[in-house]
């Protein structure tokens, strides 16, 4: 039940989106028990993001998971997600934030897990 939302203040082509979708689908398995089979992704381009006082290329990635994981796992996933977005969208890694949220209640198919 992971969800990853990527907001960027640059355009995202269809090819870039598909590549990030594939790569993030692989990366989510860094979190034990998580896989692409339950992963939902959202990509928003041309957002009005200002970072460090400028409109230079930037991205904000939010990762929400049902349950919990460790700081070490999140460090690995942050590294991988930053690499994916940086390489695909030409955004410097120092202009990318990654935020995590651990969710206790997650609904699916009309019921909570």
Image (tube, helix red, strand yellow):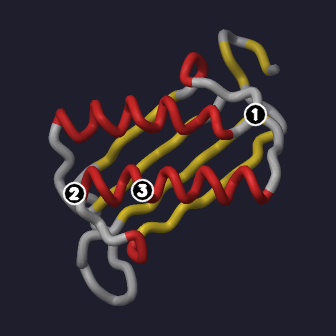
- 77 relative position to 57: left or right: right
Tag of residue 32? 1
- Kindly identify which residue carries mark 3: 83
Mark pair 2, 3: CA separation? 20 Å
Question: Callout 3: 10 Å neighbours few (<14), some, many (20+)?
Answer: some
- Kindly identify which residue carries mark 2: 46
Q: Residue furthest top?
A: 109
Q: How many marks?
A: 3
* CB-based contact (under 8 Å), mark 2 and mark 3: no
Percent across and percent down for residue 4 are 52, 42
Q: Earlier in the sequence, mark 1 or mark 3?
A: 1
**Screen quadrant of the N terminus:** top right
Q: Earlier in the sequence, mark 2 or mark 1?
A: 1
> SS of the residue at dot 2?
loop
* CB-based contact (under 8 Å), mark 2 and mark 1: no
> Does 76 appear above or below 49?
above
> SS of the residue at dot 1?
loop
* CB-based contact (under 8 Å), mark 1 and mark 3: no
Question: Callout 2: 10 Å neighbours few (<14), some, many (20+)?
Answer: few
Mark pair 2, 1: CA separation? 33 Å
Mark pair 1, 3: CA separation? 20 Å
Percent across and percent down for residue 107 are 72, 23
Q: Earlier in the sequence, mark 2 or mark 3?
A: 2
Q: Quadrant of residue 98?
A: bottom right
């Amino acid at each position: 039940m992971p969800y990853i939302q990527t907001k960027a203040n640059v355009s995202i082509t269809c090819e870039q989106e598909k590549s990030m979708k594939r790569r993030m689908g692989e990366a989510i398995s860094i979190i034990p028990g998580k896989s692409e089979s339950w992963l939902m992704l959202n990509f928003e381009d041309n957002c009005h993001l200002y970072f460090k006082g400028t409109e230079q290329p930037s991205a904000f990635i939010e990762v929400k998971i049902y349950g919990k994981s460790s700081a070490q796992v999140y460090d690995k996933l942050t590294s991988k997600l930053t690499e994916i977005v940086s390489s695909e969208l030409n955004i410097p890694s120092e202009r990318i934030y990654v935020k995590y949220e651990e969710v206790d209640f997650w609904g699916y198919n009309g019921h909570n897990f």
